[in-house]
Image (cartoon, rainbow, N blue to C red):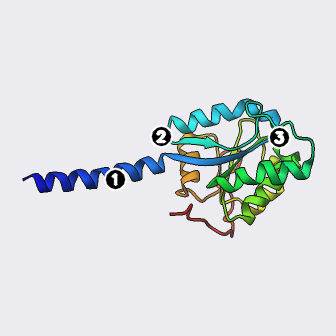
Amino acid sequence: MRGPLIETATVSSRDLESEMADSVRNVFISHAHEDDDRLGEMKQLVQNKGLQIRDGSINSNKPNRAQNEAYIKQQILMPQIRWASVLVVLISPETHRSDWVNWEVEQAERLDKRIVGVWAHGAKDSDLPPALDKYADAVVGWQGDRIVGAIQGEINDWTTSSGEAWAARRIKRHDCGR
């Protein structure tokens, strides 16, 4: 009688480990620094849906004091983008104008990372950064379950800033390393 109990416990342990592995993701959140205050809100929204994000982005809580652009890109940002399994872009009116956001998206694409856009409240379709428009795997609204699904690779569609379905897009899909 002990054998089956041990075997069942082993299977349950594997299932639990798999579930736990899916509930924590290394993510780089690309954003305009004017939107730093929204990062915590987005992480909490996602955590409330059962996904914990380990965020590798640079923000006011983890400031970068370097001045040399090449150094910042190659020595600070690139290692963080490489480390992340997903690049999430927080889409706001400020994001569209950010050369840094476009560069981060282009690097994530070059590294074959999953790229997800998330509409911040008040953003308009015209705020979509050009590189995100070109490379995103999914673009979703400010709903925790949709953000989690997009990060996990379960949602691969695009919605407009008002939440409507966006026209079908022909883009490369990623399996998030699964």
Residue at position x 70%, y 59% from top?
136
Label 3: few (<14), some or many (≥20) within 10 Å?
A: many
Q: Is residue 41 left or right of residue 2?
A: right
C-alpha distance separating marks 1 and 2: 16 Å
Q: Of circles 1 and 2, which is in front?
A: 1
Which of the two labelled residues, at mark 1 and mark 3, occupies the earlier sequence position? 1
- Residues at badges 1 and 2 in contact (C-beta under 8 Å)? no
Label 2, on which residue?
Answer: 50
Which of the two labelled residues, at mark 2 and mark 3, occupies the earlier sequence position? 2
Label 2: few (<14), some or many (≥20) within 10 Å?
A: some
Tell me the amino acid under the disc marked 2: Gly
Q: Secondary structure at mark 3?
A: loop
User: Residue 128: x and y, percent?
Assistant: 79, 50
C-alpha distance separating marks 1 and 3: 42 Å
Tell me the amino acid under the disc marked 1: Asp
Q: Which numbered disc covers residue 15?
A: 1
Tell me the amino acid under the disc marked 3: Pro
Which of the two labelled residues, at mark 1 and mark 2, occupies the earlier sequence position? 1
Q: Is residue 40 above or below residue 142?
A: above
- Residues at badges 2 and 3 in contact (C-beta under 8 Å)? no
Residue at position x 60%, y 65% from top?
174
User: Residue 94: x and y, percent?
Assistant: 84, 40
C-alpha distance separating marks 2 and 3: 29 Å
Q: Is residue 74 above or below residue 54?
A: below
Residue 129 in view here: no
Q: Of circles 1 and 3, which is in front?
A: 1
Residue 75 in view here: yes
User: Residue 20: x and y, percent?
Assistant: 43, 47
**Which residue is most to the left?**
1
Label 3, on which residue?
Answer: 93
User: Residue 126: x and y, percent?
Assistant: 82, 49
Q: Of circles 2 and 3, which is in front?
A: 2
